[in-house]
Amino acid sequence: MMNVLFNCSTNIVGGGLKNSALFIKFAIDDPSINWHFAVSEPVYQLLQKWDLNLSENRLTVFKDSPARNKIARKKLVQLSKDLKADLVYTMAGPAYVSFPCKHVMGISNPYITHADWEAYRLKGNLFQALRYFAYTFIQFLYTYKADYYVFQTQYAKQSFHKRSFIKNKKLFVVPNAYDNTLRDYFRENREFLEKENDTIKIFCPGASYVHKGLQFIPGIISELVKLTPKKFKFILTLPKDSELWKQIENELQQKKLEDYCTNVGSYIYTELVSLLEDCDMVFVPSLLETFSASYLEAMCAGKKLIVAKKSFAEDICQDYAVYTNPTNFKESASKIAKVFDDLKLSKSEIDLGNIILDQYGNQETRYYKLSGLIKTIYK
C-alpha cells in the first residue's frame, strides 16, 4: 500500500481550509491508501468540531505555516522522510518546499493562475499593486517545486500553462464540489424553512481579501435605500479586527448606513447551515476567483444568487444567478432591488440548480477523483 502525505499546513482560511477538512473526512476511511495528514491549526480545530475518528499517529499539526516559517518548512520535509512517503499531495499550494518524493500540488490561488492587472489594482495604489505582484511572483516560482498540478477549472489550468510553460501532461483538472450534508439538509427541510423575514437578509460570504469585492457594499447600500422602501440587511463574515471590515464600518458610519449591514465575524464551516438558513439571498461580488464554493452552497440552500459578471462565475452559475458589476453601485442596487420583489426560486431555477450540482458532484465524489488521480500518477 502506498504511503501518501496529505499537506494542508498552509491552509488557514476560506475554501482551502474547508476543502482540506472535507478531504480528510473521506480519506480516513479509504483502505487503499495509507494517509498521513499535515494540517494547519485551523484545519485541526475544524476536524475536532466534527469529532472525526482520527488517531494522533496519522496527524501532524503545524502551528506555524511553512509559508512564513523556515523551521516549519524543515519540519514538513523531515516528516515526509520519516514517513517514507511515496508521494505528497498538497491541497492548495505552493508548499514552499522540495519534497524527496513525487509531489502533486493543487493550485487554487487565482493570482497565480489568471489574475489580470485590474485585479492587482484592487490592492491599492500603484506601489501596493506592484508589491503584491512581486509577492505573487515569488509564490509562482515556488510552484515549480512540484511535479504535477491539479486545478479546479479548465480556465485556471490553461492560464497557468501559458504562464508557466509547464507541459499539459503534468496538469489536471478536478472541479470543486458541494457538501452533500448541506444539500441533504435543505432538501429535507425545504418546506419547513420557507418563511418570510421582516428584514430581507443578504448573505455575503467572503474572507478579508479586496478581490472579494465586499468593500463595494456601502456604496451599493447608498443606492439601494433610494430604490426600495423594504427593510434589508447585508450579512458579512469578515474578521472583526480586519482592516477591510474597519474600512467598511467607517464608511457605513459616515453615511449613516450602519442599520443596513452587520458583520457576524469569521465563521467555522459547521455554522454555514444556520447562516444560509437565516438568509433570503446570497450576494457574491467577487471580482477574482478560481472556483467559489459559495455559488454551489447557495444552490444547495435554494437561495437566489447575485454574482459579479465574470467568466469564472458564468461558467459555473449559468442562468441560475443574476449578474452585475459590483463596481457600478447603481446597477448592483437595481439588480438586488429586483430580486427583492421575488425571493422565491421558480421550479426552473430549482431544476437548473440541481443540474449544476449534479454536474460538479459532492465532496465524496471529489475525494475519489483526487485519490484516483494520485494513484495514477504514482504508478
Image: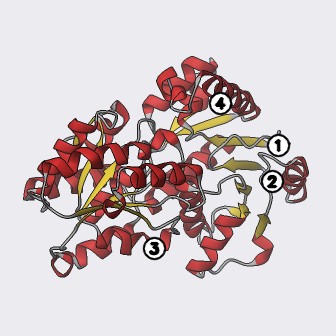
Residue located beneath label 2 in the image: 85
Q: Where is residue 223 in the image (x, y as percent from the top left)?
A: 23, 44
Occupied quadrant, residue 354: bottom left
Occupied quadrant, residue 190: bottom left
- Closer to the eye: label 3 or 1: 3
Q: Position of residue 265 (x, y in %)?
A: 51, 65
Q: Do the residues labelled 2 and 4 touch (CB within 8 Å)?
A: no
Q: Are marks 1 and 2 in contact (CB under 8 Å)?
A: yes
Q: In this view, does 47 lie above or below 159?
A: below
- Closer to the eye: label 4 or 3: 4
- Closer to the eye: label 2 or 4: 4
Q: Residue 132 carries which label?
A: 4
> Left of 11 or right of it: where is 72?
right
Quadrant (top left/top right/bottom left/bottom right) for the N terminus: bottom right
Q: Residue 271 carries which label?
A: 3
In 3D space, how far apart are the residues under numbered discs 3 and 1 (Cα atoms)?
Answer: 36 Å
* Label 1, residues with CA under 10 Å away: few <14, some 14-19, many ≥20: many
Residue located beneath label 1 in the image: 99
* Label 3, residues with CA under 10 Å away: few <14, some 14-19, many ≥20: few
In 3D space, how far apart are the residues under numbered discs 1 and 2 (Cα atoms)?
Answer: 9 Å
Mark 3 element type: helix
- Sequence-wise, which precedes: disc 3 or disc 2? 2
Q: Where is residue 356 in the image (x, y as percent from the top left)?
A: 26, 50
